Amino acid sequence: MRAAVCMSGGRESAALCRAIRLWSDMTCVRGEAFPWSPERGPLPDDVSVLFWDMDGASAPPPERFDGPGRFLFLCASASQTAIESYALHPAGLFKKPIRMDALRQALDRCVGAWWNDLEQMEVLCGGLRRQIPLYGLLWVESCQHGSLLHTSWERIQTREPLRDLAARLPAGAFLRCQRSFLINLYHVREVSQDSVVLSSGDRIPVGRRVRAGVLESCRDALRLWDDVLPPAERDGGVEPALE
């Protein structure tokens, strides 16, 4: 997944690029985001996501960006712009300043188009080797004969013990919350005194000995999406270098 960001201000553009990279890291999607403008030349062919600032744009996007696996997101300060932008077939419209939770929801809707960019883990299941995208792996529990993996679409049993699976997963995205449970931090939606609730609605218990650290890590993960990107009016006007 490669995202180009065409915003009117340098600070605003840089903040959006950082937010997209954060989403990519948390979801285990191989991707990048970089600032771009038509003055720099043609849009690279491998760009699958384009963020276009309707406030500062002197012209519409350089092409209809609505082909298979390509997504155009428009950004504007005025809600009226949504009505005026229907002809561009956007995948979504962001009201500025952009909220992180809105960005998260918009990019989540596109994940299915980037199957080849999803980091995956191979597990042995019933004599067959299965490739599981880490984005769709919600939680894992230890069971009598190995581990049970709960994904967005099915449950998969493997003889591999939980400790071995945990060692193969990125520590920044997955967390061992109890001796018998491991969770995907990106899918945490609620935190209570002794458990966490995931996007699937499953409530996962948290071990007493690790409770303080686990719950704080989950709260930190939730706080990432409460932020608001800096609005254009506070921008310093310096355009970041092309990455």
Image (cartoon, rainbow, N blue to C red):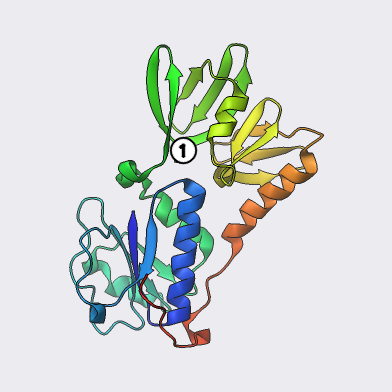
Q: Where's residue 129, x and y in %?
A: 38, 20
Along the viewing direction, whichever of 220 and 203 lies nearer the viewer: 220
In this view, the residue in front, 90 or 174, is: 174
Q: Which residue is the site of mark 1?
A: 134
Q: Is residue 107 left or right of residue 169?
A: left
- Amino acid, disc 1: Leu
> Residue 243 placed where, x, y %?
37, 69
> In the image, is 209 to the left or to the right of 223?
right
Write the residue at 24% across / 63% down: 89
Mark 1 neighbour class, 10 Å CA radius: few under 14, some 14 to 19, many 20 or more: many
Q: Residue furthest right?
A: 209
Q: Residue at x 62, y 21 (%)?
A: 142
Question: Which residue is at the front of the view, 32 or 221?
Answer: 32
User: Where 144 falls versus 43 (above or below)?
Assistant: above
| Residue at 62% over, 12% down | 144
Compare residues 4 and 187 and report the one nearer the observer: 4
- Under tag 1, what secondary structure? helix
Residue occupying image coordinates x 39% and y 77%: 241
